[in-house]
Image: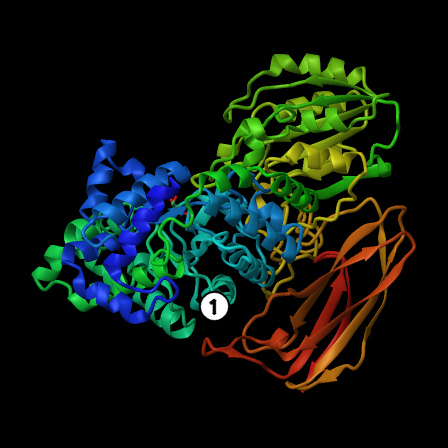
Amino acid sequence: MKNRTLLTLISFFFLFSCSKKEVKKDFIEDLISKMTLQEKAGQLNLIPTTGFNKTDSVHLWIKKGLVGHVQKSIGVKNNYELQKIAVENSRLGIPLLFQEDIIHGYKTIAPVPLAEASSWDLAAIRKSAAIAAREASSAGIHLTFAPMVDIARDPRWGRILEGAGEDVYLGSLIAAARVKGFQESNKENSNILATVKHFVGYGASLAGRDYNILDFSERELRETHLPPFKAAIDAGVSSVMTAYSAYDGVPLVANNFLLKDVLRDELKFKGLVMTDWETVGNLVKTGIAKNDTIATKMSLLAGNDIDMSTKKYVNLLPEMVRKGIISEAVLDNSVRNVLLLKQKAGLFKDPYAYFNEEREAKELLSEENIQATKEMAVKSMVLLKNKNNVLPLLKKKQRIAIIGPFAKAQKDLLGWWSSQGNPNDVVSIFAGIKKRVPQTSTISYAQGCIVEDFEIKGVEMIADAVRAANNADVIVLALGEKEWMSGEGGGTASLLLPGAQQQLLDAVAKTGKPIITLIVSGRPYVLTDVVKKSTAVLQVWMPGTTGGTAVAEILFGDYNPSGKLTVTFPFHQGQVPIYYNYKKTSHSFNAGPKNNRYTTTHRDITSDPLFPFGFGLSYNSYSYKNLKLDKTTMNKNDSIKVSVDVTNKGKYNGREIVQLYIHDKVCSVTRPVKELKDFLSLELKPNETKTATFYITSDKLRFIGLDYKTTIEEGAFEVFVGKNSSDTSKLDFWLE
Ligand code: BGC
């Protein structure tokens, strides 16, 4: 391949007669001036290789210059072949940009993004994105459709697993970390362009049904949904994908207010905008456009440069320009954005830079990638209960029964967006424990029931599981959901574990043996009964390729769990949506149902969640003492120093995530009862005390004012510091 590459490179450079070292901007203008209308529309066309009946027609389309970008084409060999056609056989030889959903890994699959967020470790999250970029770029991919930064507060929505959780502040920091991880690299050709999605508000889909309607105010838009996009843009994200949803009645793909006034003018986004899958056509389906021509016009005019998968731009735009339905200048503008993106990807310097089979073979599933992914996985698991310190399992000699439909699962540990992740490469929970367990202990296994859909299946298998439990000293019970049950299109009405898992839990619990329950899921389940019947509960999420190894390291105490939830775990399904930073209402929320009729609490259940935002245990306990402010009044140019002493009261080294929340007591608009505004991680040895120090600066007190602009108001505030959003100490301060 190397010699051929060299030849094509020479001809390519000859064609454009531009220097290898420097590609000037007028190169792009020059190129645009040479393009036919058809070739221009072709550059706006992103197609999956699956979008054709015969494989040779992809080739034909590329030859004719009708394709600008390819999706769902896997591996160097395939992508090289298509690139060669574009470069050597199309009239202008414009290289293709290969795009793909690299959400949490390409071949080495990291924990799902919601799990990674639970690490609160921005450096680790960034590194994880960088590993995904290294692998994807080695496999011939230039751009990923990630990060998804939609704030989600309804665990019924399957895509909750793809984001960072419910919090705007943390979500924004993670958005920036992931963009930088994908895009920045100190090794040549090892990064990919990032796409922040779905602009904007898609996470608010009603009832957790995917692609559903949603409705929120401009205030909610600006307070909750826009900030992570701003953070991604400020971090230099290359492209933006528009959402399927509508805002204030206007689908995002045709929403001039959001795509122009907000995205371009306010957020100053300079890069490329692309539609989501088939969204141009959706304008007709939703009755916004009466035909495809109008849909295409609306989408292009609103600023969507690339049309994903519908071929409407490429099929319709040339004629529309000829007929004067759309001006060529508008088309040129989008073509320019595309070519600039290709330039940013280095395609005009070397269209084959990402196609090196040797590198691909070396990079995918490399030892270094596996190791880093495992480190991410242990940090992302959240210990929810640990009665009598049943964990870690320290006894050298014990009988362990590993039970449950997810004990030997491999595919389900990868999650819905697992790109080229191969289930056979995944270390199952059973395999991880088997490898790590002391030789003097024994393990047994029983599947317990079958989870293949939502039906109750395999109840007859429970007897075997009970037998295994009775013959064991401790039970590891792996429960959860199938990988297809969450992710895109994975909305569920129920948040109770599917199938016969409840029956299995009930039967195993009756043995009276200690149960360590592991939850494999991409969303919070209602674990109220699971927690009641288990001695310990570890939320392992969908932990990726090294999942089983990571679980074993935690169970046997090689790693002391430190993850904390970035999404509230409901006590009851009827509480959903439930999140920590709700706004103050006139009537009390947590007065308790029995005490007072006139509250905003449900009459039949507690107002508390099962586990609040920020919650997570460790094998240690940590005490927080001496919360202090260096002063209680500040002005806008000033800051207040907040400090608290945190002591490790346990026997193990540990990492504690210390959280700071603020509440604006009097404000012209209703404010959340608490908002995360800072956090830090302390590494603490047994008996060690460290002081966590934060600074309250005026940017932490800003909010969206009555005029929808960011503002700040003098007055009284409260600062809370603690282990999670519920367990905090509070002090008052004043902004003058
Ligand atoms: C999803 C996007 C994804 C795209 C391409 C769509 O259905 O909403 O998030 O990037 O498909 O696979």
Q: Is residue 579 above or below residue 362?
A: below
Whole-percent x, y for residue 499 in the image = 56, 25
For residue 279, side relative to residue 193 (left or right) = left
- Looking at this rendering, what residue extends furthest in the right direction? 687
On-image quarter of the N terminus: top left
Whole-percent x, y for residue 379 in the image = 69, 46
Q: How many marks?
A: 1
Whole-percent x, y for residue 86 in the image = 26, 47
For residue 147, side relative to residue 654 (left or right) = left
Whole-percent x, y for residue 328 in the image = 16, 65
Q: Is residue 482 above or below residue 158?
A: above
Q: How is the structure coloured here?
A: rainbow
Q: Residue at x 22, y 49 (%)?
A: 284
Front residue of this view, candidates 310 and 482: 310
Front residue of this view, candidates 467 and 292: 292
Residue matched to label 1: 222
How packed mark 1 is, by other alpha carbons closer than 10 Å (few <14, some 14-19, many 20 or more), is some
Q: Is residue 587 above or below residue 610?
A: below
Front residue of this view, candidates 3 and 312: 3
Q: Find out if the beta carbon at label 1 lies less than 8 Å from the nearest ligand 1 atom.
A: no
For residue 239, side relative to residue 684 (left or right) = left
Task: Please indicate, yes or no, whether residue 72 appears anywhere in the rendered image.
Answer: no
The part of the image, by quadrant, that contains residue 74 is: top left
For residue 625, side relative to residue 61 (left or right) = right
Q: Is residue 640 above or below residue 420?
A: below
Q: Dot 1 lies on which element?
A: helix
On-image quarter of the C terminus: bottom right
- The amino acid pointed to by label 1 is Arg
The part of the image, by quadrant, that contains residue 696 is: bottom right
- Looking at this rendering, what residue extends furthest in the left direction? 323
